[in-house]
Image (spheres, rainbow, N blue to C red):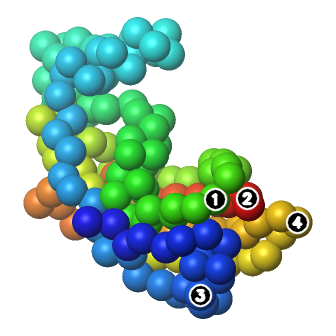
Amino acid sequence: MPRTVTGIPGLLALGPGPVDLGHSTWREITQERVNTFADATDDHQWIHTDPERAATGPFGGAIAHGYLTVALLIPMWTELLEVEGVGMKVNYGLNKLRFPAPVRVGSKIRAVGTVAEITEIRNGVEVVVDLTVEIDGQKRPACVAQAVYRFYE
């Protein structure tokens, strides 16, 4: 269940940070999901889409695209913080992005988030969030990102 805040005042009431948002639910990375992402992005590299060849490759099996992991931050983020009563929500970008460990097909991932900064901007608020994508059963994360979101009246 996400933490819910209402409007710009609700965001500002979270404080300057850090604010622990907890974690999302686990999501399984299936070969079908990887193949669909490959089709959408025209990235059909064998380490992602050829499980037989990938089994003999450097990761011991097919792995998710790094940017698939990033794309899944969108639904995982919405499980961490729900902002109601704003006119518009914008994904403003990333300050930092790294992929410390590959996500093997069949793995489960989830996001852990912490609000790092909240800054008032014209007609709204900018929220900087430190996000880590954990892989079930592994110590090294799949992704470490600092995302920037903007919320407008």
Decide if residue 27 is on the left or right side of residue 69. left
Near-viewer residue (42 or 25) = 25
Question: Toward which corner of the image does residue 46 lie, by quadrant?
Answer: top left
The crowding category of the residue bearing disc 2, from other C-alpha atoms within 10 Å (few below 14, some 14 to 19, many at least 20), is some
Q: Quadrant of the N terminus?
A: bottom left
Q: What element carries label 2?
A: strand
Q: Is mark 3 on a helix, strand or loop?
A: helix
**Marks 1 and 2 in Cβ contact (< 8 Å):** yes
Residue in the picture at 67% in, 50% down: 88
Q: Which amino acid, mark 4?
A: Arg
Q: Residue 122 carries which label?
A: 4
Of callouts 1 and 2, the N-terminal one = 1
Q: What element carries label 1?
A: loop
Residue 23 visible in rendering: yes
Q: Residue 152 carries which label?
A: 2
> Where is mark 3, residue-wise?
13
Q: Is mark 4 on a helix, strand or loop?
A: loop
Looking at the image, residue 19 lies above or below residue 97: below
Question: Toward which corner of the image does residue 30 lie, by quadrant?
Answer: top left
Looking at the image, residue 53 lies above or below residue 26: above
Q: Which amino acid, mark 2?
A: Tyr
Q: Where is residue 87 shown, x and y percent of the image? A: 68, 52
Q: Where is residue 128 shown, x and y percent of the image? A: 63, 69
Instruction: Measure how far apart labels 4 and 2 are at the Cα level.
Output: 8 Å
Residue in the picture at 88% in, 66% down: 122
Instruction: Measure how far apart labels 3 and 2 are at the Cα level.
Output: 16 Å
Q: Which mark is residue 86?
A: 1
Of callouts 3 and 4, the N-terminal one = 3
The crowding category of the residue bearing disc 3, from other C-alpha atoms within 10 Å (few below 14, some 14 to 19, many at least 20), is few
